[in-house]
Image: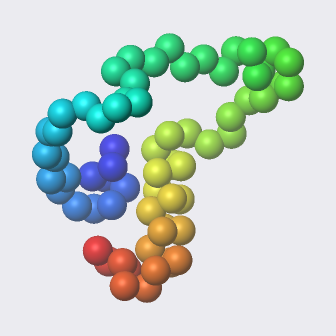
Amino acid sequence: MIEQATGKKANIQREAAQQGDVPLTWADISKARKLLGYYPQTTLEEGLKKFVAWYRAADPGLRGS
């Protein structure tokens, strides 16, 4: 997804886990949905596209990078 959002091939370099890294998560928004009525309006794919556009706009040196 990140490659698609950036238009670049990812250069993945596996490193040892750092202190505090979470190897597995059971993230769940059901409590926020129940208590706050929270329903995400943006998909992960769309959010990544928007983030990349924002990031590139925030630092002109990154445009087209």
Instruction: Name the quadrant containing residue 22.
Output: top left
> Which residue ends up furthest to the bottom in the rendered image?
60
28 to the left or right of 62: right
> Which residue ends up furthest to the front in the rendered image?
19
Q: In which quarter of the image is the N terminus?
A: top left
64 to the left or right of 53: left
Residue 29, percent across and down? 66, 21
Q: In this view, does 64 lie above or below 13?
A: below
Residue 9, percent across and down? 17, 56
39 to the left or right of 19: right
Q: Is residue 35 above or below residue 17?
A: above
- Front residue of 28 and 39: 28
Instruction: Name the quadrant containing residue 37.
Output: top right
* Count of marks overlaid on the render: 0
Which residue occupies 46% across, 44% down? 45
Q: Which colour scheme is used?
A: rainbow
Residue 50, percent across and down? 53, 59
Which residue occupies 78% across, 29% down? 38
Residue 30, percent across and down? 70, 15
Which residue occupies 55% across, 39% down? 43
Q: Is residue 14 above or below residue 28?
A: below
- Front residue of 7 and 54: 54
Q: In which quarter of the image is the C terminus?
A: bottom left
